[in-house]
Structure formats: structure tokens, C-alpha cells
Image (tube, helix red, strand yellow):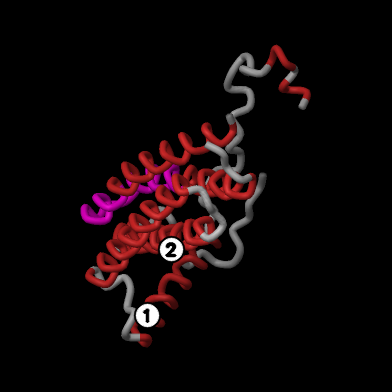
Amino acid sequence: MNFALHETLEVHELAAFKTICLTTAKTMRGLVSDPQLKEILQQDVEMTHIQLQELGTLLTKAIQ
Amino acid sequence: MNVQQDGPIKMDALDPANALNMPEMADMTFAMDFLMRAKEGVRNIAVALTETVSPQARALLREQLRQGIALHQEITELMVRKKWFHPYELQEQFKLDVLSLTNTLEISKQKLFADDTSRKGMFDRTPDEHMGGSEA
């Protein structure tokens, strides 16, 4: 699969942003006391984990 | 590092009276941070999507954009339900903003950490010693 350079860079930027988000969500989850907010944060951690893996797969393909 | 506590202490970090409502106020701040990140995420993905042509990348980003919008909605609904966010009552939102502003200012005036938080000297060697990390 061929990827244009600019789209590779866009995905790279998204991956960097998502990495920060995942770290923050994971850390904040431990500090929050409201159970519902905790639940959404946990969902976000799991979803971002999958999304980051997807972005990683795409990036690996693009770099090859 | 030497941080001076300026002015008379109005709010003492060790006074239990100041811990009143603190967990909820902290949750409100965390939720606001979360909401802003969700919002930023939606924007970032939307911008990236308009720069993308490959069908595979577009499909992936479109799905992530949908998930991002759903997450943003979920956080917004929680915050409205908890009365942490008042999109329709501007006066209420204004009061809340002033409250968190005042509290944040009070917290920023406090000396939260000990003078020296450096961990230097706690270990007999550093992991990057072999490559001259301490010289960097």
C-alpha cells in the first residue's frame, strides 16, 4: 500500500497526540473519585489503546 | 529551588477545613480537562481526515472520529447531569468559572512541595553512566 507523505505525517501527529491522551487518561483515572467519571475514563483508556494500535499498524505500513 | 509563600496565608494546605468539597472540585477539573482533550481530539482527527486520500487511512480515521464524537457527547452529558457544566444557564456557568478561578489562584499561591525535590544522591550510580549521561 502506498501512502502520501503528508498523510503519513498527519497520522504521525495524531499518534503523538493520542499517546499523551492515553497517558493522561490513565493517570487521571487514579485521581478521580466520581464512579461515573472513572468509568468513562476507563472506557477512554481502552478505546485509545485500540486506536493507538491501529494508528501504529498504519504507520508501520507507511514507513515500509 | 526555594519557593516563598507570598502574603499572609489565607488558605493552608494542611487545614482540613479546606478539604471540604475538594474531591468534587477536583473531579470537576479533571472532567473539564477530559472534555477539552476530547474536543481537541475530534478537531485533530477531522483536520487529518481532510488531508488523507488512501481509503484505508480514511476508513480508520472516520471510525476514530465517530468514536471521538461519541466520547465528547458522553463527557458533556455527564458534566451537565452533575451540574459541572451549564451550557444553557450562562449566569450559573459564570459563577462556576469564577469559583474555580479563585480556587486555582489560591492553590497557585501555596507552596505545595518541599524545597528540594531532587532525587540526586539517592542512588550510587545512574543507568546512563556508561555513556557519560552525567556529563550531558
The range drawn in magenta is A21-41
Q: Amino acid at mark 1?
A: Gln
Query: Circle 1: is it few (<14), some (14-19), or many (20+) Cα within 10 Å?
Result: some
Cα–Cα gap, marks 2 and 1: 19 Å
The residue at which mark 1 appears reads as B93
Give the mark nearest the N terminus, 2 or 1: 2
* Viewer-closest of B78 and B95: B78
Q: What predominant SS class does the magenta segment belong to?
A: helix
Q: Amino acid at mark 2?
A: Lys
Q: Chain of mark 1?
A: B
Is residue B76 in sight in this rendering? yes
Residue B11 at what x, y percent from top left? Answer: 45, 64
Q: Quadrant of residue A48?
A: top left
Is residue B20 in sight in this rendering? no
Disc sitting over residue B39 in the figure: 2
* Viewer-closest of B30 and B62: B62
* Viewer-closest of B30 and B102: B30
Residue B16 at what x, y percent from top left? Answer: 33, 57
- Identity of the residue drawn at 53% across and 52% down: B53
Query: Circle 2: is it few (<14), some (14-19), or many (20+) Cα within 10 Å?
Result: some
Q: Quadrant of the C terminus of chain A?
A: top right
- Identity of the residue drawn at 45% across and 51% down: B58
Q: B31 left or right of B42?
A: left
Is B131 placed above or below A30 here? above
Is B122 placed above or below B33 here? above
Residue B6 at what x, y percent from top left? Answer: 61, 63
Residue A10 at what x, y percent from top left? Answer: 57, 50
Asked if residue A28 is among those painted magenta in the image, a careful observer would answer yes
